[in-house]
Every structure is written in structure tokens, then in C-alpha cells.
Amino acid sequence: MGAMVIAVLEMSLPREHEWATLRALRAFWDSTCALPGCRGGGVFQEVGRPDTALYVEMWQEAAQLEAHIRSRGYQQLLALMDTAAACPELRFNFVAETRGLAWVEQLRLGKAVTGESE
């Protein structure tokens, strides 16, 4: 199995079309989250920054995300990015390791922590 991939889009919402753009991002998310391999994500706004949206997709494997990006439907997200008030930032984070609460507990208790996955 390959590494998990987290896709993150940060974009400034177009002036006077903020709500319409957010609705469109949420509709795109609603169709994306049903795809095989999509593990989570959503559309978010930071408190105090209502003009900025954060769109996140978490994929089990890169190949599943690649199929999504090649799909005809992905054009919707690219079109939304074109409406941004400033240059949007789209990045893909390839996750090599994931740690959980046990790791936090080890750190809090001062135990030696290895670089291995939990």
C-alpha cells in the first residue's frame, strides 16, 4: 500500500461571490467524499478570515487521488480556483508516517520515542 496523500487548497474567495463559491466547494466535496479511497476532508473557513476557504481531501493512496485529478469532474475544482481573488495555493502532502495518541502519551511521560509508526 502506498502513502496517504492530503490535498490542501487555500483560496481567497471572490468578492461578492463568497457564499456561492463556498456552496460550490461543498458540492464538489459532497461528490468527492463518496469516491473510492477518499478518507476524509471538507471545506473550512478560518475564524476572522471569512474571505478565505480551505478545501481538504485525504486519500488512502496516491493512485486514487491521481484518478480523481484525471477525471472530468475535477475540472469543477480547477474552474473554482480560477475565480479566486488572489492566486490560490494547492499542495499535495505525501504522508510517510502517522502517529496517534500513544505517541503523545509517550512524550508526556518522558519515555524514549522511536521513529517507528505506532
Image: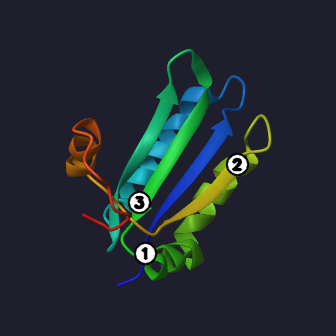
Left or right of residue 76: residue 38: left
The quarter of the picture where the C terminus appears is: bottom left
Point 58% across, 62% down: residue: 92
- Using the rendered image of the protein, determine whether residue 20 is visible from the camera's viewpoint: yes
Mark 2, secondary structure of its residue: strand
Tell me, for residue 46, which label it has, or none.
Answer: none
- The x and y percentages for residue 26 are 44, 44
Nearer to us of marks 2 and 1 is 1
Snapshot quadrant of residue 99: bottom left
| Residue placed under numbered mark 2 in the picture | 89
Q: CA distance from mark 1 to mark 3?
A: 11 Å
Mark 2 Cα-neighbour bin, 10 Å: few <14, some 14–19, many ≥20: few
Cα separation between marks 3 and 2: 17 Å
Q: Residue at x 48, y 38 (%)?
A: 23
* Residue 48 position by quadrant: top right
Whether 30 is drawn above or below 86: the answer is below
In the displayed structure, 56 sits above or below 76; it is above
Q: Determine which residue is flagged by label 1.
A: 3
Q: Amino acid at mark 1?
A: Ala
Q: Nearer the viewer, mark 1 or mark 3?
A: 1
Name the spot of residue 83 as percent of width and height, x first.
Answer: 73, 43
First reached walking from the N terminus: tag 2 or tag 1: 1
Residue located 41% across and 46% down the image: 42
- Give 26 or 52, whichever is nearer the viewer: 52
* SS class, disc 1: loop
Colouring convention used in this rendered image of the protein: rainbow
Query: Which comes before the other along the chain, label 1 or label 3?
Result: 1
Q: Amino acid at mark 2?
A: Glu
Q: Which residue is mark 3?
A: 58
Is 49 on the left-hand or right-hand side of 109? right
- Picture coordinates of residue 84 (x, y %)? 73, 40
